[in-house]
Image (tube, rainbow, N blue to C red):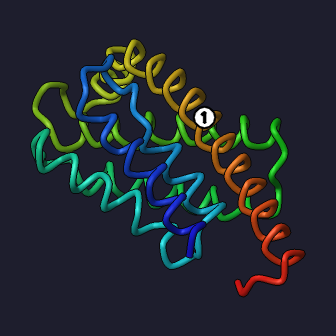
Amino acid sequence: MKHIIFASGLILAAALSRLIPHPPNFTPIAAIALSSAVYLDKRYAFIIPLIAMLVSDYFIGFHSGMVWVYGCFALIGLIGIYLRSHKKPLIIAGATLVSSVLFFVVTNFAVWFMGSMYPKTWEGLIACYVAAIPFFQNTVAGDLMYTGALFGLFELGARWLKIEQTQVATSGLPK
């Protein structure tokens, strides 16, 4: 039970960080999707990041591209499921970068496809992606920073919980 409370607290804190001023696309949600899928029961792996998005979007504002954005975070959760059995720093960093690219490609395609800002031509699609490059830099930076922080905190928390469980077991106290 303590690990669920610990994980939920970390995720809540990361979700709340979307509500404070930050550079565009420098958010913790991809990191939440990755780390939730690795450290929480599978039934929570997709629910928690999506609930975090819904709660923060309630305050930030809902938009027409939400299905695409939320779908990306569900796909990022699938990448996190893969990470469950591949928790090595280099693989986590690679998965984080793949998540950033996935989000960039899908959400900017949605902007082009659903919006009226760009012509529905190959040139319009390319112009949409080029215009989004500054946001992509923030996405990558935020995803790497938050993923490193969340994975580090989860690992520290797991070690703390193991130490506490060992102390309880050796003292003869009930668990």
Hey, which quadrant is residue 175 in on the image?
bottom right
Tell me the quadrant of the picture where the N terminus can be found: bottom right
Q: Is residue 157 left or right of residue 43?
A: right
Residue nearest the observer in this picture, 128 or 24 = 24
Amino acid type, label 1: Ala
Image spot of residue 173 (x, y percent): 76, 82
Residue nearest the observer in this picture, 64 or 36 = 36
Image spot of residue 134 (x, y percent): 39, 12
Task: Determine whether 124 is above or below 158 in the image.
Answer: above
Image spot of residue 68 (x, y percent): 31, 52
Q: Image point 40% across, 57% down: which residue?
A: 49
Crowd around label 1: few <14 · some 14–19 · many ≥20 (10 Å): some
| Element class at badge 1 | helix
Residue lying furthest right in this view? 170
Hey, which quadrant is residue 93 in on the image?
top right
Hey, which quadrant is residue 161 in on the image?
bottom right
